[in-house]
Amino acid sequence: MTKAHNVFLVGAMGSGKTSVGRQLARELGMDFIDSDEEIEKCTGVDIRFIFEKEGESLFREREKAIISNLTQMENLVLATGGGSILDAKNRQLLNTNGIVVYLETSVKQQLLRTQKSKTRPLLVGKNPEAVLTRLMASRGPLYEQVAHFSVNTEKKRLAVVVNEIKKKLLEQTVKPLK
């Protein structure tokens, strides 16, 4: 049984999950939480620091605990971290406790949206295009698997994306995780 009154946004970094989520929550009269911001709030340090000091695997454990807690809430729009879908339990929790929306965008668009960011640990000191291409190749199928539907955010204004999601939410019939 899916809690259709929760909306969980998944997608790659730079796909617009946080911006779209904040606006969508306002328009739907729901609460908004960004899972990365919640991890930072709970730990008192930023995501980049956690990656540097503890590594990605321990960050993913923290993320798993946060996703487990947040998916039990109600009346929530949740922007998940780009890698949250790597864990099968996270995918199951997201899929069964709300409507999962995959925000799709190209690597080129991701590059434009993330180029000035200093807070994305997977991109720091690396070739961003190569990293984003590799991440999309491995994560893209998982975003598609967990999502009830997708919305392309490529070169679209925030209001357009939010309106597309609202329209699709009204049409939505819930499908189980593939």
Image: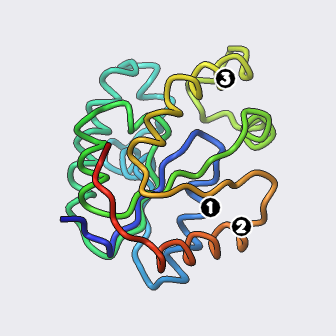
Q: Position of residue 88 (x, y in %)?
A: 27, 34
**In the image, is residue 117 above or below residue 19?**
above
Tag 3: amino acid:
Thr
Depth check, mark 2 against mark 1: the one in front is: 2
Judging depth in this view, the residue of 142 and 28 nearest the camera is 142
- Local crowd at mark 2 within 10 Å, few (<14), some, or many (≥20)? some
Q: Residue at x 33, y 30 (%)?
A: 60
Q: Quadrant of the C terminus?
A: top left
Foreground mark, 3 or 2?
3
Q: CA distance from mark 1 to mark 3?
A: 22 Å
Q: Percent x, y for residue 128?
A: 71, 22
Q: Which residue is mark 1?
A: 19
Q: Along the line of sight, which residue is nearer the eye, 18 or 136?
A: 136
Residue assigned mark 3: 133
Query: Can you say whether 38 is above or below 117 in the image?
Result: below
**Mark 3 surroundings within 10 Å by alpha-carbon count, few (fewer than 14), some (14 through 19), many (20 or more):** some
Residue at image coords 35%, 29%: 59
Q: Nearer the viewer, residue 72 or 98?
A: 98
- Residues under numbered marks 2 and 1 in contact, where contact means CB atoms less than 8 Å apart: yes
Looking at the rendered structure, the kind of residue marked 2 is Leu
Q: Which residue is mark 2?
A: 158
The answer to which quarter of the image holds residue 100 is: bottom left
Horizontal side of residue 5 vs 1, given as left or right? right
